[in-house]
Amino acid sequence: EIVLTQSPGTLSLSPGERAALSCRASESVSSNYFGWYQQKPGQPPRLLIFGTSSRANGIPDRFSGSGSGTDFTLTISRLEPEDSAVYYCQQYNYSPLTFGGGTKVEIK
Amino acid sequence: QLQLQESGSGLVKPSQTLSLTCAVSGGSISSGGYTWSWIRQPPGKGLEWIGYIYHNGITYYNPSLKSRVTISLDRSKNQFSLKLTSVTAADTAVYYCARDPGRSLSGGVIISSGMDVWGQGTTVTVSS
């Protein structure tokens, strides 16, 4: 099973700042099969990024993804209050599909 | 616009079987998705993939649950279902269904593209 480790656990930043969320895989994952989700309290996850760097429908361009192999990054270029949420990375290259433990982004 | 809605037993006794259904509306389960998944989230914790079923009925399960899980499709009702046997308190969670629409690469190959539509989730508590 591929283990995904996200860091930091919590990120506390001000509106307008840039956030960089990291996800490290225990084995190499194809960039075609890596994504990011946003989850707000009481809501299901929302797909932000698929294929490492492609934005899902309706996702603002302040969200971007990058990376390859075992190291992937989600960047939020200019934080807005509504970006307060938990962010999960996911690999869907190998079964079982796995998620990272999440990074909580707090807006000051 | 495709939508998913989970339904089923919210309270299950230990050792019994958890049964949930995901109704698909706004699209066909036979052609509107590449895979159809079940994912769960224990209270205050992260996401765990349970398994998925392809549009052609082939299933893949998480090995940690494989001996207890069955996912099936009902094309006539446009829905798919989850059965989890011999439940314990550790199975208490919010259960989500989700769709992966797939995407085409050059050459016509279709690959997974992440889960873009999710149900709102249903809470299942295992307790006597």
Image: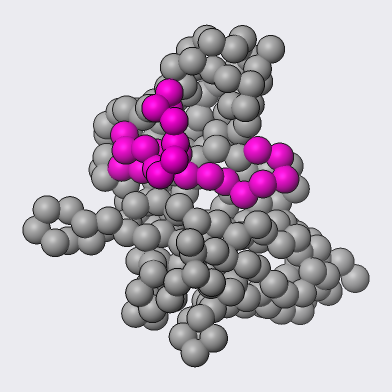
Q: Is residue B116 magenta?
A: no
Look at the image and tell me whether residue A57 can be seen.
yes
At which x and y percent is residue B36? 46, 67
When asked about the image quadrant of residue B112, the answer is: bottom left
At which x and y percent is residue A96? 43, 57
At which x and y percent is residue B24? 53, 72
Q: Is residue A84 left or right of residue B44?
A: left
Q: Is residue A48 magenta?
A: yes
At which x and y percent is residue B97? 57, 63
Q: Main secondary structure of the magenta part?
A: loop
Quadrant (top left/top right/bottom left/bottom right) for the C terminus of chain B: bottom right
Range drawn in magenta: A40-63
Residue at (65, 57) in percent of width and height: B120
Q: Is residue B103 left or right of residue A81?
A: left
Residue at (58, 74) in percent of width and height: B23
Q: Nearer the viewer, residue A54 or B126?
A: A54
